[in-house]
Amino acid sequence: MKVSLRSLAIKCRVTSTSQDMQTADVVIIGAGIVGSSIAYHLTAEGCSNILLIERESSTGKGSTGKSMGGVRAQFSTPSSIQMSLYSIPFYASFEDSLGFPCDYRPQGYLFCATTEHHMAYLQANYAQQVKIGLKNVSLVAGHEIRSMFPQLRGDDIVGGSFCSTDGFVDPYSAMNGFMTWACDHGASLWKNTVATAIEKDDSGVVSVETTRGAVATRKVVNCAGAWAAGVAALVGIDLPVQPLRRMLVPSEPFDEFPHTAPMIVDMSNGFHFRPEARGFLLAWNDPEETPGFKTDFDPGFIEKILTRAADRVPCFANLPVNPKRAWAGLYEMTPDHHPILGEAPGVPGFFLANGFSGHGVMHAPATGKILSDLILTGKTDLINVSLLGLSRFAEGKLIHETALL
């Protein structure tokens, strides 16, 4: 992953810690890409008295820095598609708007269907994507895919879908761009700081207790990623978000497959890969994985993923891989694979931006816009956010996203 901003020192105004309680208009717990995007969108609207609390010594040590960096609009539900239709153009103009790079590369996503059932699913998704406003998606025939990429084993590929504006970003650079812009415009960042309690009164949130002191505020945003359930518990909320390990395997330099290729998804088993530097980045959702805070890479995963890689891309039988360069990160899963967005029921001033189920980086710009709108105006026009509220789980109104990688 190209990391163009690692050496950039983030200049943040840090609120002083006198004996008097500090104040902030908004406290954001978690300073990864989602929290950073919310901070950016708030400051861009003129709300500068924002404090971000990060428990680590530097930002991006959670899911953000471990992400594959894919961005796509080829989803199966309106909410996911709409969030992508905001986020991808945002990434395309990121450097012009913020003055920092995010390395957006519109090389596309190619879904390869291997059964008529898969193809019918892609056709239904395509119809919905076009209806909602996605202009660059198309259905492709099996022979077209075999012609585009003769290196693939394509005897069972019956067709697929492709979107040219899907692609990749550098999550770490995007996060740093959001954070630096926000801090340059008045936001503050406390690192090595843990939220230990959230105080309430009859009107809602009144303060956040931290290992660095108390902060008076009426608005708190939970952006704690895979650790979000613990933060929600501070206000008595049972948040249905669980961590799930995802492992990624980068290859060494390899030139037997074109580096202009899109993200290619084998729908027969979920294996997918994309170009990365002079090699390729391989991913697969192991169905045997169980929830938990497991962040160590399992060396046994190498054989599993290379077996699937070589089956779909025969030249990948020669793909050089150094297991020491592979890594594991955490998805933050909800039961329906959609995020939980909005103010928490029964706790005025406590906002949720959690459970992105692997889509946190690609939907960070939209999440920042939605939460900023809700915090500042109480409503948003970007999506029907009521569909993504926490109450949907108790009410049995889940909206399952099936296009999960």
Image (cartoon, rainbow, N blue to C red):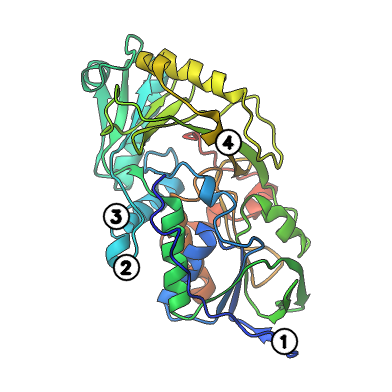
Which quarter of the figure is the N terminus placed in?
A: top left
> What x and y, as percent, mark residue 51?
59, 75
Label for residue 92?
3
Image side of residue 233 versus residue 118, left or right: right
| Disc 1 to disc 2, C-alpha distance | 35 Å
- Under circle 3, the secondary element is helix
- Under circle 4, the secondary element is strand
| Disc 1 to disc 4, C-alpha distance | 40 Å
Asked if labels 1 and 3 touch by Cβ distance under 8 angstroms, the answer is no
Which class describes the residues within 10 Å of circle 4: few (<14), some (14-19), or many (20+)?
A: many
Image side of residue 167 versus residue 386, left or right: left
| Disc 3 to disc 1, C-alpha distance | 41 Å
Q: Residue at x 26, y 21 (%)?
A: 149
| Disc 4 to disc 2, C-alpha distance | 32 Å
Closest to the observer, 132 or 295: 295
Whether residue 41 is visible, yes or no, is: no
> What x and y, as percent, mark residue 16?
64, 85
Asked if labels 4 and 1 touch by Cβ distance under 8 angstroms, the answer is no
